[in-house]
Amino acid sequence: MNWHRLSIPELFELLGTNRQGISTVAAAEKLDQIGPNELQEGKRKSIAGMFFGQFKDVMILILLAAAVISGFIGDLTDTIVILVIVLLNALVGFFQEYRAEKAMQALKQMAVTQARVLRDGSSSWLPASSLVPGDVVLLEAGNAVPADLRIIESVNLKIEEAALTGESHPVDKITEPLETDDLPLGDKANMAFKGTFVTYGRGTGIVIATGMQTELGRIAKMLQEDETLTPLQQRMASFGKKLSILVLFLCILFFVAGWLRGEDITKMVLTSISLAVAAIPEALPAVITISLALAAKRMIRFNSLIRKLPAVETLGSVTYICTDKTGTLTKIRCMLKMYL
């Protein structure tokens, strides 16, 4: 729906509202139908899920296989050493993810907003989660925009939209309909979006989208669907596969050479397995995890919270940022600090 093209009377007719807002009864019915005005989270991991999730890496699986093989051939020392290293690696990754998850939950509780809403002709402060399409929201300087709105009244209204558009300057808001269909968010001057902030003036807007239907909700949905491996995880997976193939090839070659020389088959099998275990770099995953944990701890001092350790390396892999928001970057007003 091109809400920015509609006139104010058309908005009222389409959403079944007016300048006095919808009734409390109608709002309750809509809330039951579409749900609360909240961003839906992906399936949250349990504590056990967080812990066992640390063992999904290819190198960790190879190390576990090496530990089992070492125990099978009677080399308990190698088995214990490998298991201790794998457990240490898992604990470091688990505690980092667990602490970050708790911190994010605390931030979400702090971010619960209130909105001043007109219902049945009277204004009141309500939780932003109770908003529904058709609600009339009153905005003034200092307010967070609680949902996607179509502006119907603007008195020097300016809104900071850097979170969505990257534009460092507050945007002047108007009430007139716009003629163009496919406008970027930054050019929809008669709209206000969830997650942005009023910096100046006052105004009124009609809620046209809530929750996951907002522009911010669409971004959240894309993030939940994105399961792309980080550069570090890709390289580790590739290294693990290549190492496995190489070790297997050398073990077979070693076994065949001994067998052709007339060596005892049992002895050659045990020797080949020992060679395979010795070729696995047990400390590599632990060294990487500890290095990333130290980097994450350093970034916390700069108010940068890392939820998953591989994201530290992803941030460090950024070489170029392609953007047309030159003012945002040259005036150092972007919120992201790069640690390269």
Image: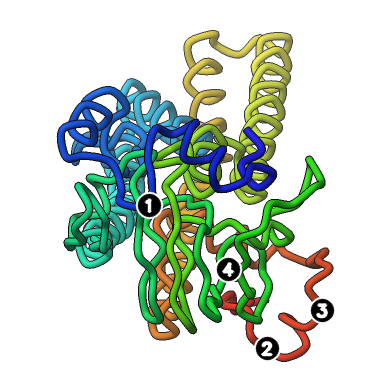
At 63% from the left and 75% from the top, the residue drawn is 172
Q: Which element is circle 1 on? A: loop
- Mark carried by residue 161: 4
Badge 1 amino acid: Arg
Identify the mark nearer the N-term, 4 or 2.
4
From this view, report whether residue 198 is shown above or below residue 151. below
**Mark pair 3, 4: CA separation:** 16 Å
**Mark pair 4, 2: CA separation:** 16 Å
- Mark carried by residue 326: 3
Location of residue 330 in the rendering, given as x and y in whole percent from the top left corner? 78, 88
Location of residue 3 in the rendering, given as x and y in whole percent from the top left corner? 61, 42
Badge 3 amino acid: Thr
Residue ID for mark 1:
19
Badge count: 4
Q: Nearer the viewer, mark 4 or mark 1?
A: 1
Mark 3 crowd level (few <14, some 14–19, many ≥20, 10 Å Cα): few
User: Which of the two residues, 168 or 67, is positioned nearer the viewer here?
Assistant: 168
At 55% from the left and 81% from the top, the residue drawn is 156
Identify the mark nearer the N-term, 3 or 4.
4
Location of residue 153 in the rendering, given as x and y in whole percent from the top left corner? 50, 65
Badge 4 amino acid: Glu
Residue ID for mark 2:
332
Badge 2 amino acid: Ile
Identify the mark nearer the N-term, 4 or 1.
1
**Mark pair 3, 1: CA separation:** 39 Å
Identify the mark nearer the N-term, 3 or 2.
3
Asked whether residue 211 appears in the rendered view, the answer is yes
